[in-house]
Amino acid sequence: MKQLDWISRPGHGLHGVVRVPGDKSVSHRAMMLGALANGRSHVRGFLEGEDTRATAAVLQQLGVRIETVGDGERIVHGVGLHGLRGADTPLDCGNAGTGMRLLAGLLAGQSFDSVLVGDESLSKRPMRRVTEPLAAMGASIDTQDGLPPLQVHGGKNLRGIRYTLPVASAQVKSALLLAGLYAEGETEVIEPHPTRDYTERMLAAFGWPIAFEPGRARLSGRHEMKATDIDVPADFSSAAFFLVAASVVPGSELRLPAVGLNPRRTGLLHALRLMGADIRVENERESGGEPVGDLIVCHAPLHGIELPVEWVPDMIDEFPALFVAASVASGRTVVRGAAELRVKESDRIATMAAGLRAIGARIEETPDGAMIDGGSLAGGTVESHGDHRIAMSFAIAGLLSRDGIRIGDCANVATSFPGFVELASACGFQLGIAD
Ligand SMILES: O=C(O)C1=C[C@@H](OP(=O)(O)O)[C@@H](O)[C@H](O)C1
Ligand SMILES: C=C(OP(=O)(O)O)C(=O)O
């Protein structure tokens, strides 16, 4: 198949209202918990991305009826905690680490065996972080030297454990909580830094007794979930590209309505403000148990910062975009404590450093971050290595470059942000598909 490359050309002020698609984390969880509940859950704002559709397709393979009733709208006909049926073919999670790791926990407690597979990128991502603590709960999951595919053996009696995560990861926490639904006794997860708490909030919304606070969650097994309707907020991580782009392109003003503002997701907002950005939040409200608000962002001169290490988990997917902001800010930006970036869809420290250098930026990699000295961007050719967030970040860089940027291998943007090229072009990006 022909590789999809983009060309991002220099541009001027960005303007307009940008409605970014639904939150990826919430969409995955809405399908999973909807499937395990008793009754029909109506999900609105579902992300029509490849990652979240893969999760829905896996659940359908396991016997769950999921009706598409409109764009971003699903009715999940829950089968109850013990209603899933084994599939006789592998379950394909596509590109989604979230899908595979959460499903590993969910499937560990079933009576049947399953095989979880993924694409080339997902097949290189570490899975022992979930299989080891799940094994301590009594699960049996075989990996290929710690990598997918995962052979999940069913029919095990799980027992709750108290587990302190070695690295902050909402995916690992969630996998253990989902296995904990099937376990005897209590499952408690303690985090080194608090991470997004969507699994906890959504379990509570589905009526499962759970105690949680930042950095800690505890539940006991063998209750029931009652179907509930879910409004998925717009994804802050998708909004992030527009927050950075409008901040750095002179003359810009963008409005991003109804963006999810869960405090465990908004680290980039604080980082950009610390750099001097002009971002306002209006109409703050609650929607489906989550804080949401409209973001208004205007151009402002940015300066480099030492990023507080404790903000890292709250902006874990936003570093590629932050690196672009830092490369055009005045002075030096220093990122530490972000080694997790090396095990995402690509090694995001190495991929960003190689790409930024190729277009004339000054960046030095460190094992757990980078040092970036702001300046101007010439342009050239960069590789996204099939990583959606890298591709979208270089689209921002192209706007500010002297000569434009060709970005290789952008098809995976459809995993998290279908329609990005159209939305970005509508507000002023000069972005197109390369021949
Ligand atoms: O739980 C989730 O929905 C996610 C958690 C994060 O991963 P980690 O748990 O590996 O930090 C994040 O990078 C990913 O995009 C989504
Ligand atoms: C890391 C990401 O997702 P996942 O782990 O689900 O592949 C991401 O979306 O940036």
Image (cartoon, rainbow, N blue to C red):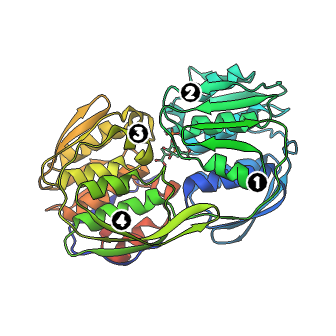
Q: Residues within 10 Å of mark 1 (few under 14, many from 20)?
A: many
At horizontal 30% and vertical 61% (from top left) the residue drawn is: 244
Total numbered badges shown on the rendered structure:
4
At horizontal 44% and vertical 47% (from top left) the residue drawn is: 314
Q: Which of marks 3 and 2 is nearer the N terminus?
A: 2
Q: Which amino acid does label 3 sit on?
A: Ser
Q: Which of marks 4 and 3 is nearer the N terminus?
A: 4
The disc placed on residue 346 is 3
Q: Which of marks 2 and 1 is nearer the N terminus?
A: 2
In this figure, which residue is indicated by the disc labeled 2? 129
Q: Where is residue 88 in the image (x, y as percent from the top left)?
A: 80, 38
Q: What element carries label 1?
A: loop
Q: Quadrant of residue 357?
A: top left
Q: Separation of disc 4 and disc 2 at Cα? A: 33 Å
Q: Separation of disc 1 and disc 3 at Cα? A: 34 Å
Q: Separation of disc 4 and disc 1 at Cα? A: 33 Å
Left or right, residue 157 beside residue 14: right
Q: Separation of disc 2 and disc 1 at Cα? A: 27 Å
Q: Is mark 2 on a helix, strand or loop?
A: helix
Q: Residues within 10 Å of mark 4 (few under 14, many from 20)?
A: many
Q: Earlier in the sequence, mark 4 or mark 1?
A: 1
Q: What element carries label 3?
A: loop
Whether residue 31 is situated above or below residue 309 in the rendered picture: below
Q: Do the residues labelled 3 and 2 touch (CB within 8 Å)?
A: no
Say if residue 434 shows up in the picture: no
Left or right, residue 358 beside residue 95: left
Nearer to the camera, 392 or 329: 329
Q: What element carries label 4?
A: helix
- Which residue is at the far bottom? 16
The disc placed on residue 206 is 1
In this figure, which residue is indicated by the disc labeled 4? 242
